[in-house]
Amino acid sequence: MSKGAGNTRTGAAGPAASTTAGAVLEISGLTVGVRGEDGERPVVSDLSLTLARGETLCIAGESGSGKSMTALAIMQLLPQPAARISSGKIRLRDMHRGDIDLAVLDERRMRRIRGDRIAMIFQEPMTSLNPVLSIGRQLVESIEAHTDLSRAEARRRAIEALKAVRISEAESRLKQFPHELSGGMRQRVMIAMALALKPDVLIADEPTTALDVTVQGEVLELLRDLQREHGTSIILITHDMGVVAEMADRVVIMRHGRMVEEGTATDIFARPQADYTRELLAAVPRIGTGVGRQKSAEAEMRGSVAVVNDLHVRFDLRGGFFGRVNRRVHAVEGVSFSIAPHETLALVGESGCGKSTTAKALAGLVPYRGDIVIGGCNLAGLGRVERKAVRRDVQMIFQDPYASLDPRMRVGDLVAEPLLIHGIASKEERSQRVAALFERVGLSADQMELYPHEFSGGQRQRICIARALALRPKLIIADESVSALDVSVQARVLDLLKELQREFGIAYLFISHDMAVVENISDRVAVMYLGQIVEMGTRDQVFSNPRHPYTKRLIEAVPVPDPAKRRPRFARLDQEIPSPTRKIGEELPKLALRDVGNGHLVAVS
Amino acid sequence: MIAYLGRRVIQSVLILLGVSLITFALLYLLPADPVRQIAGRSATPATVENIRRQLGLDQPFVIQYWHYLTSLLSGDLGRSYIQRSEVTELIVSRLPASLLLMVGAILCELAIGLTMGLLAAVRRGTATDQTLMVASFVGVSAPQFVVGLLLLYVFAVRLGWFPIGGYGTWRHLVLPSLTMGILGAGWYARMMRSSMIDVLRQDYMRTARAKGLARGAIIFRHALPNAILPVIAMIGIDIGIFMGGIVVVESVFGWPGIGQLAWQAIQRVDIPIIMGVTLVSAFAIVLGNLLADTVAPFIDPRIKLR
């Protein structure tokens, strides 16, 4: 690799930032070890890289690649006492005092570097701000920690910082608490806090992973603009190759704690050298590459597995002296759709749009109004026992494979449980069926005796799929089922889902915020916004010819994993998505769907 | 907020009503006969019946309870059978001493317990942590009369730093407060430690460190307010435990509070005093819980009272 790579800057981020050449941070031979039961195990091995002034260096890789550990090592924030830097140098260039080796710096001097010279923002804006301190207090204290400014001056700096991250009414925001702000706003506050002192280096660890795609666009653009203004060097850690393509000047690909490849963004994407990089790029879902798979006439003939008609789900909020219901969250407002066998209907939208609530109503997990017809039976008219029998046909796979399996049960028992609940098959038959299911989802039957923690995330999601399959359902609801997985694992799980569909003719209701994944798997797509469907049609209709402005924005906001197609500006959100909470009696305006041709439905207001 | 308080007050009144009914019923069903206690062993059956009628104890339960409730509304807790004075007066004259002891004990247990818990959490896994946790375990499991006598022996008898018993100066307050506080301190130390360890793991603690804040600011400004929340809810419940302890501790130290009053009354089946002390204690517990819940939103802005 090239040392002092300041002049290797390429890409479209503009020439302004690259006027000052030279490295600001130099890591050489960094090894980070984590102590475990069987001795110390390296999580970062012999890593060397250089960060030039004003450049954006992306460290990309899948979970367990050591990218976050590298960031924490730079800040000396490694989880104590288990992890430590076992060797290597982290040199921070200091024009006045010469270089400082952060790897061996004592805590007192390191504290002066943190926040002042190197700042960091984290993945979870919801939990990274202290819930009991006001935004103002948290901003002012980080300014005060490194300057001699008076309280009033620090406050003025805090307001400036909030304005810089485009937060309106900055002054009154200071009094607000984190829980009063949305995720995107909180992340902007984090950025304001990190950049208030104009650090040389900003480390952003998955800064947009927890955000909705339109908000992600906003935050990435903000980072790019601020970098252009201040000339800050950014280390951006991400698993999302789309984000890498949008942001990076240079890219480091990591795997199992080692650097696999390093190069300019253009080179990495256009001419990847390492096999792993090629695999990684191949696994990335891209919009516009979904295999054409039109709904067959046969599927049309067979009728519907599930029909949802005018579904409403509202949650009561209580208040007032007698604790009466005075407001309602209108989570789902008059949603209608149907799913045929062999078909995948994707429900897309951003957080709070009601897509998961729709799924829960369909699975019988929340009370609803309206009609849900499964296999020709309207659930509304059935008693408990009959309803249980119908529900067998609908199974669910959840987002978090870590939290959705009982840690104290053997995975074989977990998969057998649905059979047990519905009183199907004898004990031997059950274990035979479970063994067959394990084989089918790509696990081996002798793994049935193990516990969930002994599996990786992808394997656990396979166990969840096996469990969902146990009752041979007609419909599987997959709620963000691949969102928590690494891209390579994600691709394999998606393939498995498709295979199972071909084999058993299962219909999927596939819920996701990830437009590229949706494009990859779905036959039809319904876009939800504020509890209502704003657009619905075949995949090609929605993706090639989006008609509703919200759909357009959603598709445009997805970062394209190709630096050559980098957008000059991201889709901008005019305002925050409004709340679906309404006072009693106040109704949300109902959208009517109009057919614009061949069943492509678009909302007209 | 006001609606919330209104609702809570109504709930509290209902709770107190329930407590009064249950206590009254239990005392009614008691095999010990208060009239015999008052009349003495040599009294004739006629005298006994006479006293019974005077006290209204010959009336059916419902009538007795109704009379008690109606006079309660005017602040009248009845007359003591033995001491020949108003229960309200007796309790009012002794309440300040008990409240003082309670405040002293709460300060002790918070000061000792929270410090121990905080220190143990920050030094998690070290010898300090282990020593503190053993100490807290001893504090939790030691009976109060043993702790009281031990403290008396060491600090009053051997060292002579504090008086052996009685009431009056701050010196009198120290040993009884400590005795009461040590039990709670053990609980609080354990609670504070686990709460603090949980908070130290949170993402926002990493943010605070990443900002380059000093260690003191990180622990006291960022961690402590978050960690102390569950402990505050505990204080409300704690007052109930106090009421039990106060009977023992006031007897050991000769502290003239309602605990001693209750102790004497129980021995002599002085029903109006037992009723009165029970109601006052229940009131203190209800009030303590209400206060704890009302304070919480000032520490955690996410908590809304409604």
Image (cartoon, coloured by chain):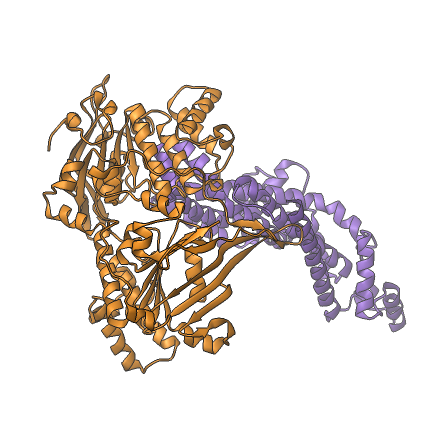
Chain colours: A orange, B purple
At 63% from the left and 48% from the top, the residue drawn is B290
Q: Is residue A271 left or right of residue A356?
A: left
Q: Is residue A88 left or right of residue B181?
A: left
Q: Is residue B136 visible?
A: yes
At 81% from the left and 63% from the top, the residue drawn is B66
* Residue B237, horizontal then vertical, whole percent: 58, 52
Q: Which image quarter: residue A197?
A: top left
At 22% from the left and 20% from the top, the residue drawn is A19
Q: Is residue A584 left or right of residue B43?
A: left
Q: Is residue A169 above or below residue B144?
A: above
Pick the residue in front: B155 or A339: A339
At 71% from the left and 63% from the top, the residue drawn is B23
Pick the residue in front: B67 or B153: B67
Q: Which image quarter: residue A34?
A: top left
* Residue A3, horizontal then vertical, whole percent: 12, 28
Q: Is residue A129 visible?
A: no
